[in-house]
Amino acid sequence: MASPTDSRIAALRRAMRRRGLAACLLPSSDPHLSEYLPGRWQGRRWLSGFTGSAGTVVVTRDFAGLWTDSRYWAQAEAQLAGTGMQLMKQGAAGVPSPADWLAARLRPGQRVGVDGQVLGLALYRSLSAALARAGARLDIGADPLDGIWPGRPGLPGAPVYPHLPPHACASRADKLARVREAMAGRGADVHLICTLDDIAWLFNLRGSDVEYNPVFLAHALVGRDHATLFAAPGAIGADLRRELAADGVEVADYGLAAEALGSLQTDQTLLIDPARVTCGVFRDMDPAVPRVEATNPSTLLKSRKSEAEIACVREAMEQDGAALCEFFAWFEAEAGAGRLTELDVDERLAAARARRPGYVSPSFATIAGYNANGAMPHYRATPESHATIAGDGLLLIDSGGQYLGGTTDITRVVPVGTPSAAQKRDFTLVLKAMIALSRLRFPDGLASPLIDAVARAPLWAAGIEYGHGTGHGVGYFLNVHEGPQVISYRAAPGPDTALRAGMITSNEPGVYRDGQWGVRIENLVCCRPAPQAGGFLEFETLTLCPIDARCVDAGLLDEAERRWLDDYHATVRRRLAPLVQGEALDWLRARTEPL
């Protein structure tokens, strides 16, 4: 019996024949290049059945394949089994990129269909160049899934609401002025913004169109003395429209953004970020309109949190830490009886956070992986596939919350029963890696990828590597993954990746034993000027939750590392104790005892 994926691939191939296409490419993206996609643009997931957040599908007349990176190989192998879709292990030796794979197989004159509305401009250019070597080209004029996806979701349009003081620490007018100053520095008259978190930050607005991210569907055109916000009809109410108008912001229908670009004159210079816009948005624009290409000013501005914002984040971290104390106190009382599952972890964590002031929603899908499931960095328990937490082992929990005053992201590993010597060794090596980065001092403006080796060194010394980055930027009641900084030696260092004061970044090294267990310890840290060291920065640890010393092999820590852990636990106890009581307070005290 054919799988749903087989029949969907067959329907796509029939549509390809009608359009005369040799191949189709389905990226994991939407018109805003979001990480989490509204249902309408989850076409790659609908076609392939693969539910991971990153992947690209290529379909030809006799091949269908999914490219995804090492974080998702185990998941993809399971979800693609029995379908007509082949897993292409992106990044593995001998596996070409989708572009190179296509270029090696297409003939001159053949076309590859892809929806230009969701194809990033930078990716469009690289794909076009690769296909040109074979004499082939991209066809971006239509969505390949139009007409073959029954019941395709429509556009989201949930109500938009203002992000208000005291949590909104700068006014809309002030942010617009700062963006316009950057535009003037680039010689631009108009600036197109398509990324949803940039738009939400700039206009002090929030929404719920995208799962886990408090953003809303929109484009924005910012001129020297006016701005237009293109949003779903009805999403922005009359009162909010009047507030926006007072700051020189007009609201227009979401679908009119391309038309507005088409009205630009050749004496107007447009600023765009080629990494953050799609090629399809320019379909009506006169190619003679001059363009300036640079990183969105808002991307750089919002990455550097103000002192007032950092103060709010500290309060959010305290509330998040208190929720975690309540959760772990409950978990330890219940664990070991064999009644709990990974699904219970997600449910109880969400409930504990929901009781804290300022909480809005999870910041991403909770990862609760017991033993072998913890070895998959992006594992997600489902009702159909999950583990019971019983016997001896390690439970990895990666979770976070959206608060009006900040976004949290924390990973902790706790023992169930008695951890083995090998598990304690892995845990302690990861702890050493996390502490090494936590204690680092570095020059202001250093490219963030360059510090990755500091965290990895204790693991490399033991012959251990992990496939994900060590750190990503984090938003302020915005996306849990935010740029431009990234701590990963696989990323290209450049001026925009510079570490600056006010940036909030994760610190999350890991060890993953396939089929056995996983260890990842994650705190969020903030770049701060180092005292008595002009021109240098250091990290302030923001996350407040004990690191389980029952998993630590103390003999592997040096004196400075032990002191760091004890000092961290003293800080956690001091700041969280006033916020918890009863069993949660008892748990906090027990887990913050000096090593």
Image (spheres, rainbow, N blue to C red):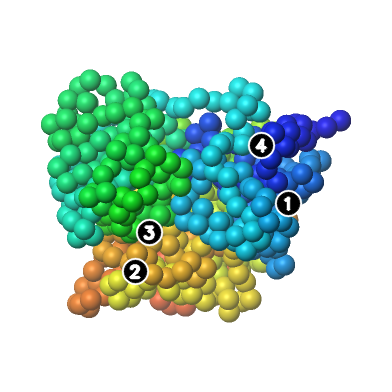
Is disc 2 placed on a helix, strand or loop?
helix
Residue highlighted by disc 2: 495
Q: In the rendered structure, which disc, 4 or 1, sits on the residue that comes first in sequence?
A: 4
Element type at mark 4: helix
**Residue 248 placement (x, y as % from top left):** 15, 35
Which circle's residue, 3 or 1, is located before the other in the chain?
A: 1
Determine the image quadrant of residue 484.
bottom left
Task: Mark 3: give few (<14), some (14-19) or many (20+) Cα within 10 Å.
Answer: many
Q: Which residue is drawn at 29% across and 28% down?
A: 252
Amino acid beneath label 3: Pro
Residue to which mark 3 is pinned: 484
Label 4 and label 1: CA atoms lie apart by 26 Å
Q: Quadrant of the N terminus?
A: top right
- Residue at position x 60%, y 30% from top? 146
| Camera-nearest label, 4 or 3 | 4
Which of the 4 image quarters holds residue 194? top left
Q: Can residue 195 be seen in this view?
A: yes
Q: Distance between the residues labelled 4 and 3?
A: 39 Å
**Disc on the earlier residue, 2 or 3:** 3
Residue at 71%, 55% in the rendered image: 106
Q: Nearer the viewer, mark 2 or mark 4?
A: 4
In the rendered image, which residue does mark 1 sit on? 87
The image quarter containing residue 107 is bottom right
Residue 156 drawn at (x, y percent): 44, 27
